[in-house]
Amino acid sequence: MKFLFAFLSICFLPQLSIAQSDYVIDINDRQIYGTISLSTPSMNSSLITFKDQKGQTKQYRPDEIKEWSTGSLTYVTKFYAINDRKGYSVFMLRLTPEKGKCHLYEHYNTTGEVGYTQTFLEKDRILTELDYGRFRKQLTVYFEDAEELAEDIANKKYKKKDILTIIEVYNEWREFLWK
């Protein structure tokens, strides 16, 4: 009997880990495992459907949870500012590892029937939209506290496609600075 239990446990363990890889983190920092049903990119930025391990289904808006993840995608609740006085909470796809002081996020937005993606940098909890038209100029100023990195950006060592590398270099510099 013990052999049968051990054999079945080994056979079904991968299935359990796959089924439990999706999660939400609620506003009390509790990580709840279950299954997330993906929708369109614009819907995923404002509402998700989550089925917990007990089989209960619930829809969550960005103001109800801090983060959700399915597969390799992690969405974090962020405040999307329309102007200096108005804005609302949205889910943004985090494109960088959780560790570090600087992050890159992608937000899918819509205007009428047209959808578009916006890219945001976050440093010290402040979101700044990335302007690819002014990429070099914007990032030279944005990373001016890391003088060598800012100089490399200004001297065209990095291109737009290197944004994740730039953030990685900056985060390594910040981590080294505080050791």
Image (tube, grey):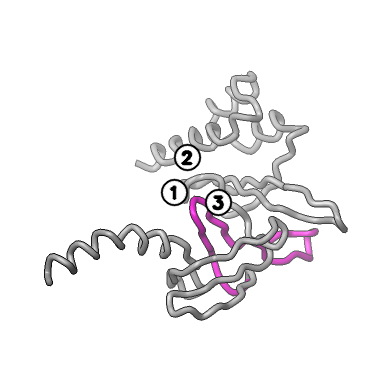
First in sequence: mark 1 vs mark 2? 1
Density class for disc 1 (Cα within 10 Å; few <14, some 14-19, many ≥20) is few
- Kindly report the secondary structure that dominates the magenta region of the rendered protein: strand
Quadrant of the rendered image containing residue 39: bottom right
Q: Is residue 86 left or right of residue 130?
A: right
Looking at the rendered structure, the kind of residue marked 1 is Lys
Q: Quadrant of the C terminus?
A: top left
Give the residue number, with chain letter if any, for mark 1. Answer: 99
Q: Nearer the viewer, residue 154 or 22?
A: 22
* 1 and 2 marks in contact (CB < 8 Å): yes
Q: In this view, does 136 lie to the left or right of 172?
A: right
Measure the alpha-carbon separation of dots 2 and 3: 11 Å
Residue occupying the far left of the picture? 2
Residue 31 location in percent, x, y? 43, 69
Quadrant of the rendered image containing residue 86: bottom right
First in sequence: mark 2 vs mark 3? 3
Looking at the rendered structure, the kind of residue marked 3 is Asp
Give the residue number, with chain letter if any, for mark 3. Answer: 124
Mark 1 vs mark 2: give the one in front.
Answer: 1
Density class for disc 3 (Cα within 10 Å; few <14, some 14-19, many ≥20) is few
Looking at the rendered structure, the kind of residue marked 2 is Asn
Q: In this view, does 66 lie to the left or right of 13?
A: right
Residue 143 location in percent, x, y? 59, 36
Mark 3 vs mark 1: give the one in front.
Answer: 1
At 44% from the left and 48% from the top, the residue drawn is 99
In the rendered image, the vertical position of residue 165 relative to residue 15, given as above or below: above
Q: Which of 57 and 100 is in front in this view?
A: 57
In the rendered image, the vertical position of residue 82 relative to residue 64, given as above or below: above
In the rendered image, the vertical position of residue 94 relative to residue 144, given as above or below: below
What's the magenta region?
Answer: 63-90
Q: Is mark 2 on a helix, strand or loop?
A: helix
